[in-house]
Image (cartoon, grey):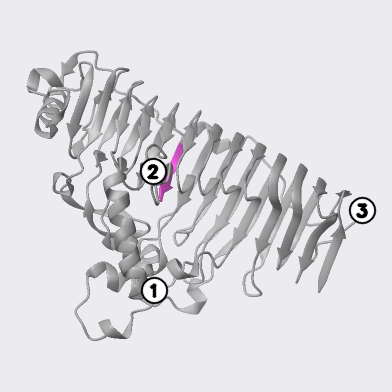
């Protein structure tokens, strides 16, 4: 069944089944860091030999200062004005790493300055270089200040593009992101009560801020500027990865992949770990370039649920709201409320796909590698997910009070017969777009007070729908 609705029309969909928005769920009061380091003594990295000359490698001096501060019960680790080159450092319990205005922490471009650790990257647990700044198995930690943490990522971007060209030619697009080991800028891993406040991050080698297996974390007043000096691939802004009770607020992100992204593991390995991202509040943020202002997936294996996102603006990102997965991911994205959105110059306002980026999402070993001993992470990527476990589910999503301008498509939402897009509601939305877009395999959708002002004069194309009723 296919229906094309007329454009320049106020469309009202109504039926008995719906999913009402809850703008103030009880769990909201539980999100974010509940403690912050309260030590007042300042430990200057310069007193341990750090030199802010952009040349001296200060990893050992900075780490020595952090260790001293933590051993004394916590406090503030700070820098005299300057530009400090460093490899991976590890912030410990009770420590506030303060990067003040006039201070830049520069990431080394030598991958050997980032020790290999066990972590999860792009949904797969594997050995990978540590980040520039790490909070691992800690609690009550802060990284604050109005200074800059600069990943100096262009070296790693160029390395990736060179490898990508080589891997594409050999049928290895699916694994190049994992073989090209680029350092993340800040990773919070298996930690609790962590605050990241006020920092300007720029030129990430890979992801910028990743919250992994953590809880009660706050990221606020952060700027991400990853387009300085080039176009960095996969330079996500903020990734919330199998974590819970998280708050992201008053952040400003310009990057080259997802701006704020919720993840929960990839394919068989993500299903093995089976840890959801849940109870997340995202509010009062803005974005420029990127893969999506608020993105769910594509790593959905452990499920993503209980998310509220509101008071958001974007100008230039790929989609205001994006849900994406693949047929081998599994997991459920559900109980999502997004409201008060102002989007301009996006490619689409709402983009939903269960079959996102096939050349990246599906692993196939070329014949030339059959019978050979493969790296652990290759084997994880090649592990077959049974069909009944691989199909993801998107349901119970409410979007309201959205204004979209200067955008080619309003909605592109594609489900499949085995996994319809179920219980979606849109209310009080205005799409000033070239084309309204399409909904395929939608079930129990409500569009109430939704206006499409289209340049082509046409409305939504609706196909394979169930219980989506149009009452103009």
Would you say 42 lies left or right of 204 here?
left
Crowd around label 3: few <14 · some 14–19 · many ≥20 (10 Å): few
Secondary structure beneath dot 3 equals loop
Secondary structure beneath dot 1 equals loop
Mark 1 or mark 3: name the one nearer the start of the chain.
1
Would you say 70 lies left or right of 1 here?
left
Percent across and percent down for residue 122 are 37, 57
Secondary structure beneath dot 2 equals loop
The residues tagged by marks 1 and 3 sit, at their Cα atoms, a distance apart of 45 Å
State the residue position of label 2. 230
Relative to 292, say whether 386 is above or below: below
Q: Quadrant of residue 160?
A: bottom left
What residue occupies the far left of the structure in this picture? Answer: 49
Kindly report which numbered mark, 1 or 2, lies closer to the viewer in this rendering: 2
Q: Per the image, is 244 magenta?
A: yes
State the residue position of label 1. 363
Percent across and percent down for residue 13 are 84, 54
Residue at image coords 20%, 16%? 80
State which quarter of the image contains the N terminus.
bottom right
What residue occupies the far right of the structure in this picture? Answer: 472
Residue extent of the magenta highlight: 239-246
Residue at image coords 66%, 67%? 420
């Amino acid at each position: 069944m296919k229906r094309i609705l007329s454009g320049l029309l106020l469309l009202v969909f109504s039926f008995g089944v719906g999913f009402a928005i809850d703008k103030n769920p009880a769990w909201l009061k539980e999100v974010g860091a509940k403690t912050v380091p309260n030590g007042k003594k300042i430990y200057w990295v310069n007193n341990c030999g750090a030199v802010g000359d952009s040349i001296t490698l200060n990893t050992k001096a900075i780490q020595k200062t952090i260790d001293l501060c933590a051993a004394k019960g916590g406090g503030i680790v700070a820098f005299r004005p300057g530009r400090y080159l460093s490899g991976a450092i590890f912030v410990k319990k009770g420590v506030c790493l303060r990067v003040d205005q006039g201070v830049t922490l520069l990431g080394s471009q030598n991958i050997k300055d980032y020790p290999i650790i066990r972590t999860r990257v792009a949904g797969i647990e594997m050995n990978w270089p540590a980040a520039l700044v790490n909070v691992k198995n800690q609690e009550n930690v802060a990284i604050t200040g109005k200074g800059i943490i600069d990943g100096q990522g262009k070296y790693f971007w160029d390395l990736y593009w060179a490898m990508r060209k080589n891997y594409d030619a050999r049928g290895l697009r699916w694994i190049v992101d994992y073989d090209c080991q680029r350092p993340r800028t800040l990773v919070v891993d298996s930690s609790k009560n962590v605050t990241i406040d006020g920092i300007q991050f720029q030129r990430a080698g890979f992801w910028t801020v990743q919250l992994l297996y953590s809880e009660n974390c706050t990221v606020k007043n952060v700027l991400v500027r990853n387009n300085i000096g080039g176009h960095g691939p996969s330079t996500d802004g903020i990734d919330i990865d199998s974590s819970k009770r998280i708050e992201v607020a008053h952040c400003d992100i310009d990057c080259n992949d997802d701006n704020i992204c919720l993840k929960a593991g990839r394919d068989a390995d993500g299903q093995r770990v089976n840890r959801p991202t849940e109870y997340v509040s995202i509010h009062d943020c803005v974005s420029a370039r990127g893969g999506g202002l608020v993105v769910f997936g594509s790593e959905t294996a452990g499920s993503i649920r209980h998310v509220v996102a509101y008071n958001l603006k974007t100008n230039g990102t790929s989609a205001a709201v994006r849900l994406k997965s693949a047929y081998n991911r599994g997991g459920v994205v559900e109980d999502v409320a997004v409201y008060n959105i102002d989007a301009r110059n996006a490619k689409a306002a709402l983009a939903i796909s269960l079959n996102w980026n096939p050349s990246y999402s599906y692993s196939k070993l070329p014949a030339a590698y059959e019978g050979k001993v493969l790296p652990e992470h290759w084997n994880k990527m090649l592990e077959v997910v049974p069909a009944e476990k691989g199909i993801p589910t998107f349901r119970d999503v409410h979007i309201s009070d959205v204004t979209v301008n200067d955008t080619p498509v309003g909605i592109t939402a594609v489900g499949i017969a085995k996994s319809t897009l179920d219980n979606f509601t849109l209310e009080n939305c205005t799409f000033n777009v070239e084309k309204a877009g399409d909904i395929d395999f939608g079930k129990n959708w409500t569009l109430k007070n939704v206006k499409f002002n289209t340049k082509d004069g046409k409305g939504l194309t609706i196909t394979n729908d169930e219980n989506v009723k149009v009452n103009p």
